[in-house]
Image (spheres, rainbow, N blue to C red):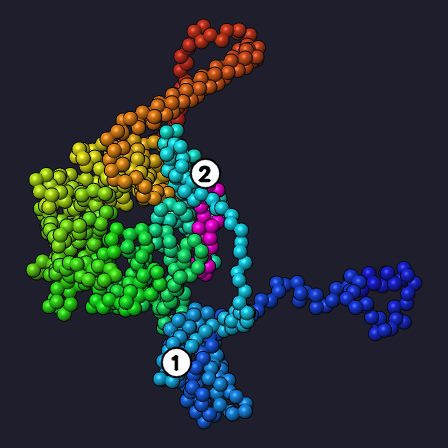
Amino acid sequence: MAEVMAMETASRLGIDLSNVDWDSIHLPPGEDCGILSDDEDLNEGDPLEFDGGFSNIVVVDNIPIVPTEKFEKLEGVVRKISSQMGVIKEEGLWIPIDPASQKTLGYCFVEFNTPQEAELAKEKLHNYKLDRAHIWAVNMFDDIEKFMNVPDEWAPPETKPYVPGENLQHWLTDEKARDQFVIRSGSDTEVLWNDARHLKPDPVYKRQFWTESFVQWSPLGTYLATVHRQGAAVWGGASFNRLMRYSHPQVKLIDFSPGERFLVTYSSHEPSNPRDTHRVVLNIFDVRTGKVMRDFKGSADEFAVGGAVSGVSWPVFRWGGGKEDKYFARIGKSVISVYETDTFTLIDKKSIKVENVMDISWSPTDPILALFVPELGGGNQPARVSLIQIPGKEELRQKNLFSVSDCKMYWQSSGEYLAVKVDRYTKTKKSTYTGFELFRIKERDIPIEVLELENKNDKIIAFAWEPKGHRFAVIHGDGPKPDISFYSMRSTHNSGRVSKLTTLKGKQANALYWSPAGRFILLAGLKGFNGQLEFYNVDELETMATSEHFMATDIEWDPTGRYVATSVTSVHEMENGFNIWSFNGKLLYRILKDHFFQFLWRPRPPSFLSPEKEEEIAKNLKKYSKKYEAEDQDVSLLLSEQDREKRKMLKEEWERWVLEWKRFHEEEKSDRQWLRDGEASDEEEEYEAKEVEVEEFLDVSEEVLFDFGQE
């Protein structure tokens, strides 16, 4: 086609193409005159991307300086040690040689298959002692450029003008004393007020694709964290601006410290060698500055709980010391490593050696660490629960336990009590029974009380302490409808003895949800019980209401204990959404959302009021409540007025429809009269009803019967 067009153009211009010297024709530099090159299609694809980084290369300094005849031996030693961290690429080990002396220069380059393996080599091989004279110094190759750019002369840092930030506690100043919550459904993430007076949520902020996996409030409600492929981010203030980013590629999980000072991020990476375990990367960031305070890298087995189970149990680090975030701990193989956040190093620079330790749990308020050690030596050494004071590492209390199959620890929110649920083998070892060891932490010498149920063979389905109180609840039993028992650590006659308050027989419940303010509890039947709900007043020992949220998967009280949310997440394909209830079981409103993933109340920080001031307010509550009662009455009147307006609109709409129908009926009167052959009446009573009988033959058949009497 192009050739034909060229010949036509040449003919029109009077050019004889047979006499043209094509080799003498040259286009101006950089000009194609609209003529496409034969190679043009090669440039139409996506540009090739080359990995120009060196993130998988480490520099190992302070290796021995040896002559040529010992070079092979040195290479073998370096390769053997480095290959323990990961797979070294083919020709990935280079040891430079001085051309003049023909000796090594005292450093080498090691190239691994992945950046994660290189990071691990830097972590594990730095300060590796090859011998007394050779202690390795390992750095990432990418860091060389950073070190080269350090100026020779010190210059004072530039002073930036102060710009006041947003009030991050703005939501606490709401005049209506409402609480916020966040929901995720589909690609949307929304923050809303719980406007229970108007029986609806009030929008605050909405954004599409705000997170790639989940959102999480910080423990005091200051920040909302989102998770992305590149790392995590926190948002806050009235307009939910981004406050800080935390770079951690492929982050999967995050965890705040109780006082919101630090953020832990976690990721796992598949090794290049299938025989190796997953590599784990943990970073601890300063929440405000975004600086990495400490990182931990290693195989998944190194972070397994107790060293006995393959896989990482989240959270890896347990925070202690109350809201001050002074300490965090992790379990290793027969060790407990406790770090202090002032230096992010081990206390006394060494871990606590505890043979075969399986679980640890911090007091919510004090630097006391509870630990569980199972039986050792086939039962010759009993299991035990110990309380360790940090930072001194003194053992405050210890309890030996025999014939133990399993153990779970539950701290009361004020740190006054510790309940240890102990599953023990019977003498035949064929079955187990359960009892509780109750530690009174605040009392002298920490007395321990043993509690066994009336039927000690009952299976314990759930246990929960009353927040800020002295009671606890237990769901127990083996049948389809278990019992629920309530106990108090302070009986009427003896404050140092546990006593049973009551037992509720045959309940459709398998989960316990205390109100954050105590006193009230929601007895819930999830999963197999299909969302049965019972709102119970423990002070009066009476049921306030029973209801159902069919297929409910999650339940969460608001931080004040006034409202509770039940939700159905996308685990189920139907009925996705959430319900908001009052503390006494009245359904306030229901919101349906397709592909519903999360519902989280925004936590509140502790009150600044002293216990004495809170007690004074409780005594004079009627005086303070008059203002809010008046506001509630105004809202009730407003809702009533809205209902009246709605009914009025419906009535007017009905009357308009009736008038329109009558007008249409009148317009068609002549047509109806014609269809009735001139009869004018539309009145039904003037019609004469006649019965008409119609005979209809459904089927006719003839049949010849043989008469056996005739031959």
Asked whether residue 304 is in view, the answer is: no
Tell me the kind of residue under disc 2: Val
Q: Is residue 629 left or right of residue 272?
A: left
Residue assigned mark 1: 135
Give the residue at x 17% y 59%.
Answer: 396
Identify the disc placed on residue 204: 2
**Residue placed most toward the observer, 696 or 134:** 134
Magenta run includes residue 608: no
Residue 168 lies in what quarter of the image? Answer: top left
Instruction: Tell me the element at label 1.
Output: strand
The percent position of residue 566, horizontal first and vertical second, equals 32, 40
In this rendering, the answer to whether 130 lies above or below 355 is: below
At 37% from the left and 45% from the top, the residue drawn is: 221
In three-dimensional space, the C-alpha distance between marks 2 and 1, rounded to whole angstroms, equals: 58 Å
Q: Earlier in the sequence, mark 2 or mark 1?
A: 1
Horizontal and vertical percent position of residue 120: 40, 71
Place of residue 235 in the rendered image (x, y in percent of width and height, measured from the top left):
45, 48
Q: Where does the N terminus fall, quadrant-wise?
A: bottom right
Comparing 436 with 140, the one in front is 140
* Label 2: few (<14), some (14–19) or many (≥20) C-alpha neighbours in 10 Å: some
Q: Quadrant of residue 40?
A: bottom right
Q: Which residues are magenta?
A: 231-253
